[in-house]
Image (cartoon, rainbow, N blue to C red):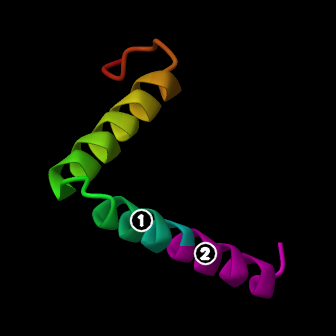
Amino acid sequence: MPLTHFLAMIALVVMAAALTIWVGLSAGIPPVAFVLVALSAALLVHLNLRDGRDHDA
């Protein structure tokens, strides 16, 4: 992937996140809800990426 496409993708993701937070806050959603949703999503991604192997071996 060329550097310009990578940087444009990062910029779009940051702008989309800012827009989501702005719309949510203007709609009256408390900031704690954003934190809980983000942590829940991170937990789900983490649990889905595990392959069932034990890391001690």
In the image, 43 versus 29, the foreground residue is 29
**Range drawn in magenta:** 1-15
Q: Residue at x 28, y 51 (%)?
A: 34
Can you give x and y, in whole percent of width and height, for residue 17 in the image?
Answer: 47, 66
The N terminus, quarter of image: bottom right
Q: Which residue is mark 2?
A: 10
Mark whose residue sits in front, 1 or 2: 1
* Residue 37 image-quadrant placement: top left
Secondary element under disc 2, as helix, strand or loop, is: helix
- Magenta span: predominant SS is helix
Is 45 colored magenta in this rendering? no
Q: Residue at x 46, y 33 (%)?
A: 45
Q: Earlier in the sequence, mark 1 or mark 2?
A: 2
4, above or below 39, in the image: below
Question: Is residue 18 left or right of 29 when viewed as pictured?
Answer: right
Is 4 colored magenta in this rendering? yes
User: Answer yes or no: do the residues labelled 1 and 2 have beta carbons within 8 Å?
Assistant: no
| Farthest residue, direction right | 2
Can you give x and y, in whole percent of width and height, for residue 23 in the image?
Answer: 41, 65
The amino acid pointed to by label 2 is Ile
Question: Is residue 12 left or right of 30 when viewed as pictured?
Answer: right
The amino acid pointed to by label 1 is Val
Question: Is residue 15 left or right of 27 when viewed as pictured?
Answer: right
Q: Which residue is mark 1?
A: 23
Can you give x and y, in whole percent of width and height, for residue 9 in the image?
Answer: 69, 73
How far apart, in angstroms, are the residues tagged by discs 1 and 2?
Answer: 20 Å
